[in-house]
Amino acid sequence: MSKNQQNAKPKRKEPSAWTQTILAAMTNYIDAGSIVAGGAGLTLWEKELNMGATQLGLLGAFSSNAISAAIGALIGGRICDKFGRKFVYTYDLLFYMLGMLLIIFAQNFYMLFIGYCVVGLAVGAGITASWTLIAEQAPSEKRARHCGAAQVAWALGPTIVLLLSVPLGKYGLLGNRIVFGHLFIVALITWLLRFGMPESENWKANKEKEKALIASGQLKRITWRDFFGKMINIRTLLFLTGVYAIWNLAAGTVGFYMQHVCENVFGQTNQTANMLLALYFGITVLATFFIFMGLGDKVNRRFLYFILALCGVAAWSLLTYAGYYKISSVPILIGFVVLFGINNGSCQQPFYQLWNSELYPTRYRAFAQGITFFTARLILGIWNIIFTRINGEGHFTRAAAIMVGFMVFSLLVGTLFAPDTTGKTLDEIEKERYGDHLD
């Protein structure tokens, strides 16, 4: 053996596609976990800091549930396409952990509010990077299965948060601070593990091609005007908004306000409310794994979407009925969380993530995802303020009926305009929609 061979360092083995998927998907765990941890302790923080409806609305509107995440996605998506997926999904967790520390040790509303905003910014940026990376490294014939893993993580985070919240509930606000502390630890471990992840091969190849074309004068750097100047991008944005952003007005309300509604509208205890929401996210995990991941690459997606979207319509119709007749029945609430859990785990959210990655070209895939995610969370932030006002005036049934309308609208958009992308590579989909050239 030569001296050079003896001194040569062994080539580092890159993590498998599934390892990369799981590490990228952890952004969803800490995203949804932070939303639900906030919801689980909302009444506790409300009493401790003497918050009114306006402050509650601001927390919901600017937390990782809405506007701050929207802004983070817009910024992060742009950075992600310019500097790479790895740059964002590695370093955004530092900001997440900073926000978590502010929440954990919050002594007043302003400290809590700033912590929520910092966490939201980090989450928004991380989502665009993680969803993009998962889609780009997944085998074309298993893309729905890999994208579904992010949805499993998204539901698993709240499930763990709520299961922790039940025994820790007896410690009051301290228990909620401990729940947030667990999210800090998960983020720290994920941040350390992500250093071994490679950059997206799809992005690297496209970036080299793009640089060569820009240098030769055949291509310009992408701008907002370029993006919105293409009708296909506008149509895709409107489609994804109809599928996800409108549906998310109801799902986001559940994620942040469900415990508050269970306690103050349906007369349940905080622990019962946490158990109901834990069941909801547990059903979400099962639905994602067995329905979306199991069938998303095998059956007609349009038909699958329609059937599962109906579950969402039925769920909110049931809750509207219970609210109208003032039925404080745990079985009815269980019926709601089962139906909407199935819908949440296997319909609008995972399909949105899948289509968001498939329908835009590599050159500005993360940027486009940032725009669609920004749109969804911004609309949700506005709705959070409206919902807290309606609910605070004792008109929950009216808000629930409006959300039935959201469910129906999302069902129609997704069913009528679902794209045929099953089994196709991202390059094949891009050529079908945009042609062979980059512009």
Image (tube, rainbow, N blue to C red):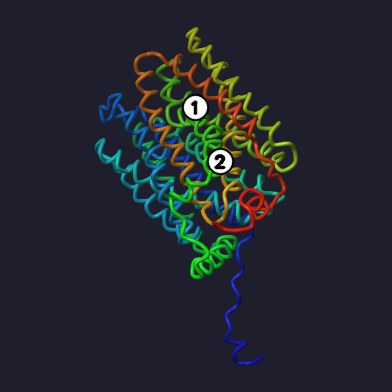
Which residue, given by chain and number where applicable, does mark 2 sit on?
236
* Number of residues whose C-alpha sits closer than 10 Å to that of mark 2, classed few (under 14), some (14–19) or many (20 or more): some
Which residue, given by chain and number where applicable, does mark 1 sit on?
250
Which residue is at 41% across, 24% downward? 260
Question: In front here: 290 or 207?
Answer: 207
Give the tally of numbered discs: 2
Mark 1 → mark 2, Cα distance in angstroms: 22 Å
Measured as percent of width and height from the top left, residue 389 is found at: 35, 21
Which residue is at 64% across, 60% downward? 16
Amino acid of disc 1: Ala
Question: In front here: 416 or 350?
Answer: 416
Q: Is residue 439 left or right of residue 424?
A: left
Amino acid of disc 2: Thr
Image quarter of residue 399: top left
Say whether disc 1 or disc 2 marks the residue closer to the N-terminus: 2
Does the rendering let one see residue 198? Answer: no
